[in-house]
Image (cartoon, helix red, strand yellow):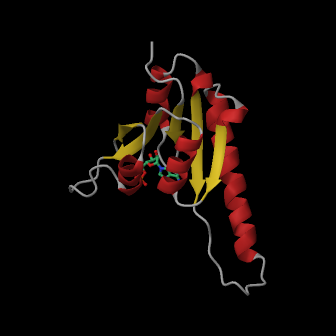
Amino acid sequence: MSAYKKILIAVDVCDDYQEVIKKAMKLADDPEWLHVVHVVEPIYYPENYMGGTAIDFQEKTVEFAKSELDEIATKHAIPPANRHILIGKAATCIHVFSEENAIDLIIVGSHGKHGLQLLLGSTATAILHGAKCDVLAVRIFD
Ligand code: AMP
């Protein structure tokens, strides 16, 4: 029986997330306990910018992320209400979301890049440092 009942999986839909999901599935007795989140970094453009390209690109990025996240979540029976696309800085969005939704465990991938600074990876390190709940870093072998 898992000690965690509300688990947030941070998924980079453009990266290797399989190990992260696999670990989460082993921890949760019920897929309803799992939430998946992907954060889209905002595209900044000048205040007086009138063209549509940057806005279109942002919308397409969100659409792409949503469809990828849906595919991943459906494969693992994670309910539609537990799939979240957020816009902002990954670690900040994940911290705010976790606090507002009483998440008790965040699961994040960690790349085994060399060097102390890259031991966890930049996003994983940022998530770990500001989190108010437990964080599990799942090693991703490149
Ligand atoms: P990185 O620090 O970029 O190597 O990413 C390590 C881990 O941080 C990934 O395996 C994900 O768990 C998480 N992560 C990175 N980028 C995002 C993102 N845009 N949205 C959600 N989680 C992310």
Q: Which residue does the image show at 36% across and 45% down from the upper left?
A: 110
Taking the image as shown, residue 141 lies to the left or right of residue 48, namely: left
Q: Is residue 104 visible in this depiction of the protein?
A: yes
Q: Which residue does the image show at 63% across and 33% down from the upper left?
A: 73
Question: Within the image, what quadrant is residue 132 found in?
Answer: top left
Front-most of residues 121 and 127:
127
In this view, the residue farthest toward the bottom is 48
Question: Within the image, what quadrant is residue 108 found in?
Answer: top left
Whole-percent x and y of residue 15?
49, 49
Whole-percent x and y of residue 63?
72, 54
Question: Within the image, what quadrant is residue 74 found in?
Answer: top right
Front-most of residues 102 and 23:
102
As drawn, 50 above or below 123: below
Q: Which residue does the image show at 73% across and 71% down from the upper left?
A: 55
As drawn, 75 above or below 45: above
Q: Quadrant of the N terminus?
A: top left
